[in-house]
Image (tube, helix red, strand yellow):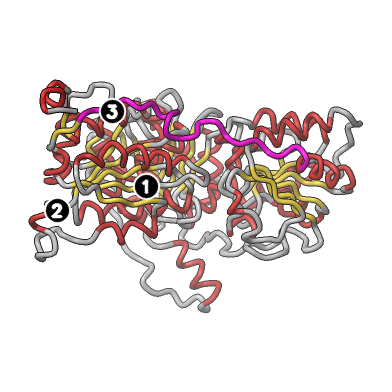
């Protein structure tokens, strides 16, 4: 190209090219906080009405909102922060995305080149810092690499197993001119999942056909592919009961007659009693987590044959050796098994699911004392499920309160439950719920956490109020660290240390923020308080004073 031709090509800034790349990927929300080195991106978002920018009060909150949005929308999301402390503040949520296989793309600033390696303010080597908690981290050296970096960030984030990626650039790079590219996503990344090998599905069906006590174990991969209805039909056609992994009880909603509920610690007794008896375990869309299995035999029999299907082949055989590992889409595996099942006779379930569920529910109900004061956390968990509409989304924080909620949560629909998979980061539930509500505005969203979690990101309540994002926040307030009390009680002879403190009245605090707030001390007031929180049409906190001594088990006991 000669000089005349070069001058005739329209150019844009690197920041504009970056934002256009986000538009091509279908990004319609960006979460973050402006800073010196990402202001060029914010300036372009200012004139991009297709993307709603959510200004948060902390970078961790921004990244957790992106996490919740990506999970609820089932698509990638974006967070942008500035260099140095902006990056270090957001990493807890990015690590959660890494552990939970959530495609969050962080687009951050970095110090200008003239400032680097001179001990400048906010200067640090950010890429080595980000590499252990992302699938790919890259510092864009010059403007010609901006568009390529955006493409790769999405390509890598969406390649199985999915997860976060990180790109960064200094303001000087983002303000330079570049010829825009208009490459569509289908031209630089695969958009159709690979199918499972038919011969392996034949082998799986042969093992299932010979099994006396087969069991489906369902993971989030089935939900990600929107294959839950097909999975339910397969269970019905084969008569095989289904348990769900701890982090995705809604992958096989517990309202289904063949649903045993979630496995493992704080799971359902019905699932934990059936699973050890299974001789063939068919794990579909599964990533085995420690809460479901404790990474040892017991919940699964050592003699059981495991068929493990996943879209991420590197996850096969990590925890348990398998009789058959199958890589490919959950949808193709389910359809393949259904086709083979249709050629034979349906069998009766080997396990009485209805009785096991009824027995487990009776045991749970025995623990409920609706009139007890202080209020029992089990009663709060029970009331959350009672008041939350069937299509509602529940976001559960780590800690004692979250464990109780998981034990009592019965799912009616898919994509109705979130926790911070395999990271257990206290404090993420409120911003995750805000992100989820933005992704699914027509669905009610409730988050639940302990009082420590409430204090971690309470500033994001202002974000919810300012942006008119009506989430309900139920706080299990036991004036301390209930989860650590449970561990100190179990393993340290009840010698409690550094687990007690005092809290503000979270209901009153909510009102100061401009939200709806209530402080509940009597069990008879709880149901009405949660219902009013949903009905008020704005962000709301229900602060529930609970019994310090009612602690969830720290280990699974069969």
Res. 553 image quadrant: bottom right
Q: Which residues are magenta?
A: 179-199
Q: Is residue 173 above or below residue 111?
A: above
Q: Earlier in the sequence, mark 2 or mark 1?
A: 2
Q: Hey, which quadrant is residue 442 in on the image?
A: top left
Residue bearing the label numbered 1: 165
Q: Quadrant of residue 349?
A: top right
Let me know if residue 193 is in the magenta part.
Answer: yes
> In the displayed structure, would residue 535 be above or below residue 293?
above
Vertical comparison of 178 with 476: above or below: above
Q: Earlier in the sequence, mark 1 or mark 3?
A: 1
Residue on which disc 2 sits: 111
Numbered badge on residue 529: none
Q: Residue at x 83, y 32 (%)?
A: 340
Rendering coords of residue 151 (x, y %): 35, 37
Q: Nearer the viewer, residue 373 or 410?
A: 410
Instruction: Work out how far the residue at label 2 is from the one at label 1, CA to CA, in angstroms.
Output: 19 Å
Q: Is residue 542 visible?
A: no
* Disc 2 secondary structure class: loop
SS at mark 1 in the image: strand
Say left or right for 528 vs 252.
Answer: left
Nearest the camera: 12 or 467? 12
């Amino acid at each position: 190209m000669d000089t005349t031709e070069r001058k005739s090509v329209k150019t844009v800034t690197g920041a504009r090219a970056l934002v256009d790349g986000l538009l091509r990927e279908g990004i319609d929300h960006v979460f973050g906080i402006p800073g010196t080195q990402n202001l060029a991106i914010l300036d372009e978002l200012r004139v991009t009405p297709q993307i709603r920018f959510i200004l948060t009060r902390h970078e961790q909150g921004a990244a957790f909102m992106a996490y919740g949005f990506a999970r609820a929308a089932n698509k990638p999301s974006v967070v942008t922060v500035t260099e140095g402390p902006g990056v270090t503040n957001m990493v807890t949520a990015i690590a959660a995305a890494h552990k939970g296989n959530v495609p969050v793309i962080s687009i951050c600033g970095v110090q200008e080149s003239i400032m680097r390696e001179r001990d400048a303010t906010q200067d640090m080597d950010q890429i080595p810092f980000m590499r252990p908690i992302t699938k790919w981290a890259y510092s864009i050296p010059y403007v010609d690499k901006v568009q390529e970096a955006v493409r790769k960030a999405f390509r890598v984030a969406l390649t199985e197993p999915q997860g976060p990626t990180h790109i960064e650039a200094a303001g000087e790079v983002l303000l330079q001119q570049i010829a825009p590219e208009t490459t569509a996503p289908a031209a630089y990344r695969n958009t159709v999942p690979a199918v499972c090998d038919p011969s392996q599905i034949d082998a799986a069906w042969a093992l299932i056909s010979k099994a006396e006590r087969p069991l489906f174990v369902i993971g989030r991969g089935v939900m990600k592919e929107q294959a839950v209805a097909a999975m339910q039909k397969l269970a019905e056609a084969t008569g095989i009961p289904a348990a769900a992994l701890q982090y995705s009880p809604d992958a096989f909603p517990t309202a289904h007659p063949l649903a045993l509920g979630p496995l493992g610690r704080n799971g359902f007794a019905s699932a934990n009693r059936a699973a050890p008896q299974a001789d063939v375990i068919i794990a579909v869309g599964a990533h085995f987590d420690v809460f479901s299995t404790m990474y040892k035999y017991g919940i699964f029999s050592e003699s059981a044959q495991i068929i493990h299907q996943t879209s991420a082949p590197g996850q096969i055989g990590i925890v348990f050796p398998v009789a058959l590992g199958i890589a490919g889409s959950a949808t193709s595996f389910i359809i393949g098994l259904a086709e083979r099942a249709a050629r034979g006779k349906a069998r009766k379930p080997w396990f009485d699911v209805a009785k096991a569920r009824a027995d487990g529910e009776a045991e749970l109900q025995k623990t409920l004392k609706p009139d007890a004061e202080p209020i029992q956390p089990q009663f709060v968990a029970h009331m959350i499920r009672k008041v939350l509409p069937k299509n509602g989304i529940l976001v559960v924080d780590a800690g004692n309160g979250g464990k109780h909620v998981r034990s009592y949560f019965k799912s009616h629909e898919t994509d109705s439950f979130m926790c911070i998979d395999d990271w257990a980061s206290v404090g993420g539930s409120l911003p995750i719920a805000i992100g989820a509500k933005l992704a699914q505005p027509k669905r009610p969203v409730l988050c639940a956490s302990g009082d420590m979690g409430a204090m971690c990101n309470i500033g994001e309540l202002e974000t919810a109020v300012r942006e008119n994002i009506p989430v309900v926040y139920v706080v299990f307030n036991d004036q301390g660290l209930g989860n650590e009390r449970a561990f100190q009680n179990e393993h340290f002879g009840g010698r409690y240390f550094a687990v007690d403190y005092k809290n503000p009245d979270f209901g009153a605090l909510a009102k100061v923020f401009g939200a709806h707030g209530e402080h509940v001390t009597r069990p008879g007031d709880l149901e009405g308080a949660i219902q009013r929180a949903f009905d008020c049409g704005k962000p709301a906190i229900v602060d529930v004073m609970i019994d310090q001594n009612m602690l969830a088990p720290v280990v699974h006991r069969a």
